Amino acid sequence: MRIAFVVQRYGAEILGGSEYHCRLIAERLATKHDVEVLTTCARDYVTWKNEYPEGNDRIKGVTVRRFPVAVQRDIAAFNQYSDWIFHHPHSREDEVKWLEMQGPWSPALRDYLAKHCRSYDALIFFTYLYAPTVLGLKVDPGRSILVPTAHDEPAIHLGIYKEMFRLPAAMAYNTEVERQFLKTRFEINAVAEEVVGCGVDLLPGSDGGGVPASTDDRGERRKAAPIAAAMGFDEPAAPTSDDEPLPEHLLHRGARFQRRHRLHGQFLLYGGRIDPGKGCEELLEYFTSYKEQSGDADLVLMGVKLMQLPEVPWVKFAGLLSERERLEALEAATIVVVPSPFESLSLLALEAMAVGTPVLVNGHSEVLVEHCRKSNAGLWYNDRDEFVEAAKLLLADDRLRRSMGRNGKEYVKREYRWEAILAKYDRLISAVRQR
């Protein structure tokens, strides 16, 4: 079958959020279907600046068609307009203006979809929020599957989304929590629905007991560093050389990552956009309180830095990592922390569980709390004191961490096996074809 994914941006170096989720699904489905991705030339979600070349590309077996963004986002003007529209009476035209200001606004992408939609057996839209989905779902609703990746936030209460959620023929939810939230809030007319989520990719040979060394990793990291520079983000300090193999007695979990980044003790790890909107500002405040109470662990952040970090020795910026090193980091961490109050799935939490690392998550996210309840592989916090006490407990109790690590692996194997995930997508695709 011929399938098109529609998503706001797409690239091998985008290692978080709905775009990463979309890529994982597209690459897996491409092994048995003819898969294309329709997206923009944007790499940076803040400005949507056209950075990728317009036209066709090929990434890991998937054809990618890129279309230009018509207008870069003025983030200050957009934030100001958002504050007004979320708190004042307004018209539908005001909401359409907000959608255009939010971006990415790509008339060329929508025109291509309108002209070629019937050449695809199914159209899979990732993320309810952005213009490519809101406008694209109107083109051929009966052939469309929506992966909403939704949570309760101000934008979802706008009227344009009430219209949008009525349209798709099928829905692929990330969790039962997300499904219940959307079904309570919106009139959903889909003929097929599944709680799908996403499988978790581990490196070949890795089962949570050690990511194997690879001569390819140096090349992957060399590619990642210029990407960060090209995007205008800071790079971490140059790591120590790890070209020579580690002695056998040093090949414990995460040893290579720890040596590369000069980590000598316990540490909490965050991965993704380093951004106040992802809870990172609060994380730093809470971790400072932990340090003020004589805590001796460090905090390591990996990903794209969109905010200033304090210049203290116990906060370390690992930068934008290759996929291999990212998984090595998850294994090396004592605890993986997920501070975002808004999650529809959290691949970071699931990947940490898959390699046997316990998680500490924001208790204001129902999805994250549900992961912890069902897996018994992590703790959650609702305020500063709870964060400090939970971190101290996990850091002090090696036996508890090992037990949670085993629980996490079993949870991911039980709930997020790729065979089950892809079977659900096949059922949704068959449903829209039959319709």
Image (cartoon, rainbow, N blue to C red):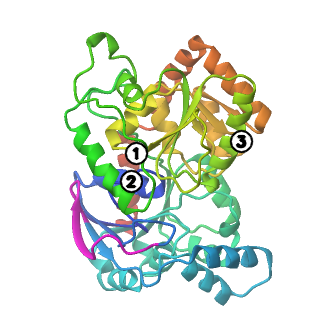
What is the crowding at mark 2: few (fewer than 14 residues within 10 Å), some, or many (at least 20)? Answer: many
Residue 244: image x %, image y %? 22, 25
Q: Residue at x 41, y 85 (%)?
A: 107
Please provide the residue range marked out in magenta.
Answer: 48-63
Dividing the image into 4 quarters, which one contains the C terminus? Answer: bottom left
CB under 8 Å between callouts 2 and 1? yes
Dividing the image into 4 quarters, which one contains the N terminus? Answer: bottom left
In terms of secondary structure, where does tag 1 sit? Answer: helix
The amino acid pointed to by label 1 is: Ile
Of label 1 and label 3, which has the lower sequence position? 3
Instruction: Please give the label number shown on residue 285.
Output: 3
Is 289 on the left or on the right of 378, as rendered?
right
The front one of 131 and 330 is 330
Q: Which residue is mark 2?
A: 425
Q: Residue at x 70, y 35 (%)?
A: 288
Q: Residue at x 53, y 61 (%)?
A: 148
Residue 371: image x %, image y %? 59, 36
Q: CA distance from mark 1 to mark 3?
A: 37 Å
Q: CA distance from mark 3 to mark 2?
A: 41 Å
Q: Is residue 57 magenta?
A: yes
Tell me how many marks there are.
3
Q: Is residue 254 magenta?
A: no
Residue 142: image x %, image y %? 43, 74
| Residue 294, quarter of the rendered image | top right
| Residue 319, quarter of the rendered image | top left
The front one of 196 and 288 is 288
CB under 8 Å between callouts 1 and 3? no
Q: Residue at x 72, y 88 (%)?
A: 91
Of label 3 and label 2, which has the lower sequence position? 3
Q: Which residue is mark 1?
A: 421
The front one of 115 and 217 is 217
